Image: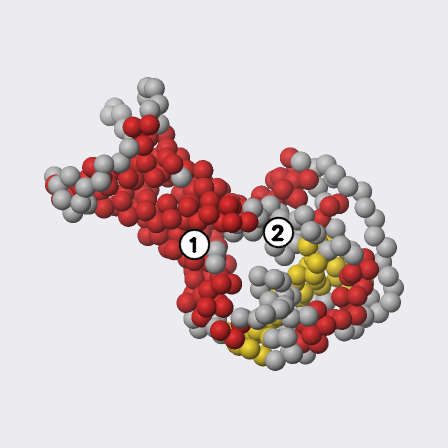
Amino acid sequence: MKRIKLPSLTQWHRWLGLVLSGWVLLMAVTGSMLLFKNQWLMWQYPSLRLDNPVSQATSATIADRYTAGYAYLPTDGRPWFELVDGEGNHHYFGPQGEQLLTRAPYADTVSWFVELHHHLALDEFGKDILGVLSLFALVLITTGLVRWWPKRQWRWKNLAVRFYNPFSAKGMQTLWQLHRSTGAIVFIPVALLMLTGSAIMYAGTVKNGLAAVLPMTPSQIHHSLPKRSATHWQERFAIAHTVLPDADIRLIYLDSGRMRLKWPDEWHPNGRNYIAFDETGTLSNITDVRTRPLGEQVSHMIYPLHVAAIGGTTMTLIILAGGLALLLLPVTGVWFYLKRRTKR
């Protein structure tokens, strides 16, 4: 009986790289640009360059005019009031409640980059595809590191790159060394992007798994529910400030009367604390993330790591380095493969 020969580690790495190269490039370009989404929007639309954030009172007045969709409250880095209606149109409002801009879905490059990076412009089906591709990408970078790992004593020359014209005969050496050394040097940021990206695609499963592993609740806090009715958003904001006085309101859901709040030391840019009002406008539920299982709190740190929402400029540079490496790795890898086939 003939013995079946399994693919070697090199073959796995090569074929996974060839199959995933286009997708990796797409994720690297869109993800790197979206790190600077707010700055990009202000550059493309000068009307969004506001001196001061829109006030909460003005935001509440604008929100009262809508009954569907959701809205982001202004911050220092995003000073406008941004409302997304039921059809996916983004409306931007200024300090006096004036409408500055409306962006329809797929109406500009920013929108395309968001849709492609989040779900390949295929809605929920695209998220399923991204989840599978992210898992294969983890295998890809792991096999690459294992192949590079020195079999004997580690030396700095293991990271050396001799630069030749990549179109010349010696260019193969440069492409190979650049591919190998980039993957080794920037492995941690790249692995962080792949791990967090995969976890975001399977957020529910990851959250439940971490909560099962770390079920303890660090804090036992109880909040009273004020019984007064609040039919307007300004009244709801006032109740929220009473119940969670140190938390900032970041996101409101116009059709359900819910809002999300962020504690000062919380990683997630929009927070994971919820306040909900029933159909009569009475406060019906409070979810304080500090009272949730430790594993669930850890799961809320995944997205901020992926988008560099913490750590300031240092973390942004680390994540950007990972994105740039994901641009260079597929280009050098596929180019080297094609040159070697041509040579043969």
Residue 175 location (% of width, % of height): 24, 41
Q: Is residue 205 visible?
A: no
Depth order, front residue of 225/164: 164
Find out whether the residues at labels 1 and 2 contact each other: C-beta distance under 8 Å. Answer: no
Q: Which residue is mark 2?
A: 268
Q: Residue at x 43, y 54 (%)?
A: 32
The residue depicted at 46 percent of the width and 44 percent of the height is: 318
Q: Is residue 196 left or right of residue 141?
A: right
Q: CA distance from mark 1 to mark 2?
A: 19 Å
Q: Secondary structure at mark 1?
A: helix
- Quarter assignment of residue 225: bottom right
Label for residue 223?
Answer: none
* Residue sitting at x 76%, y 66%: 237
Image position, residue 119 (x, y; %): 46, 58
View extreme (right): residue: 227
Residue count near mark 1 (Cα–Cα under 10 Å), binned few <14, some 14–19, many ≥20? many
The residue that disc 1 covers is 32
Inspect the image, locate mark 2, and give the three-letter code of the amino acid beneath it. His
Which quarter of the picture shows residue 205? top right
Instruction: Provide the secondary structure element on which disc 2 rests.
Output: loop
